[in-house]
Image (tube, grey):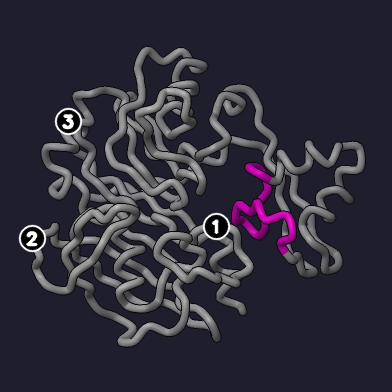
Amino acid sequence: MIDTVKKKQTMKQNEYTVSEPKELLAFLQEIMPDSSRTKVKELLAHNVYVDGRRTSQFNFPLQKGMKVSIEKATGKDRLRPRDLDIVYEDQHLMVVNKHEGLLSYSKFPNDKTVITVLNQYLEASHQRCHAHIVHRLDRDTSGLMVVSKSKEVSQKFEEDWKGMVFDRRYVAVAWGHIEPPKGEVRSWFTDGEYCVLSSPTDNGGKLAITHYEVKQTSRRYSLVELKLDTGRRNQIRVHLRDLQHPVVHDPMYGYKEDLSPVSRLCLHAFRLCFTHPVTGKRLKFETPVPAAFLKLMEL
């Protein structure tokens, strides 16, 4: 049996209906005339939803009839970190939705990472434990990660990652139309001086296998779902480049002159399913496709 886990709505929301087309920041300033521009921007960074999707794009084009919701934290919710969303938590582990721009882990203690942010939360909520990294996402990739509360639980994942994690998928916006629309990319990775190098033939590197399926196309872009057989560094970004359809706004593997109207790497880990290492329950987590991705698909 699979337990599908959804984020609990523990925060109060104020909802507003858009009466005329307007950019999101201007709309927020209009409905909150007593709040400073700085305060409004702070809310926009983490607490604003448009038609149910968290949106931080200040110039997001609102249309008549859209619903804008603003979350207001109360009580324990104020302890929850702003750089990620805790979508599940028990005494053994947490599943978080990491925002783009946040490191998963760093050997430098002064860097802000998923681990440092969660340790602050655990300390503030008086939990006698520390966060331990189980797997990583690139700094500019958003999405679902599992983080343990003990070395023992991390060790269980490490010992049988492929056996415990039974579904893990990403969604990306790539340039152009990918042909064929469904397939597999297989290559061998080696570390270059600045980035990962990919070879179509076995050159002694590490084998990387990615399955992809185009879910939607627009005039300029493809919305692609991806599933990994292997977990190599930058694997999706490298393989989409190999297909000559790089991820939109990828500064390392994408186009040097990326004219897309977004300011983030368009890659998101939207599904994570695993067997709980302690309880044995099969858990399934999903997050929506980021609003910025869907907006691009309208262009």
- Percent x, y for residue 91? 33, 24
Badge number at residue 155: 3
**How far separated are the C-alphas under marks 1 and 3?**
33 Å
Mark 2: which secondary structure?
loop
Q: Contact, CB < 8 Å: mark 1 with mark 2?
A: no
Q: Is residue 221 above or below residue 4?
A: below
Badge number at residue 204: 2
Tell me where residue 187 sits by quadrant: bottom left
Mark 3: which secondary structure?
helix
Q: Residue furthest right?
A: 33
Q: Badge 1: how crowded within 10 Å, few (<14), some, or many (20+)?
A: some
- Residue type at numbered disc 3: Gln
Q: Residue at x 54, y 37 (%)?
A: 83
Q: Is residue 27 above or below residue 277?
A: below
Q: Residue at x 49, y 17 (%)?
A: 125
- Percent x, y for residue 92? 29, 26
Q: Does the stretch in magenta take in 27?
A: no
- Residue type at numbered disc 2: Gly
Is 5 positioned to the left or the right of 188 in the image?
right
- Of circles 2 and 3, the one toward us is 2
Q: Contact, CB < 8 Å: mark 1 with mark 3?
A: no
Numbered range of the magenta stretch: 45-60
| Front-most of residues 297 and 200 | 200
Badge number at residue 264: 1
**How far separated are the C-alphas under marks 2 and 3?**
28 Å
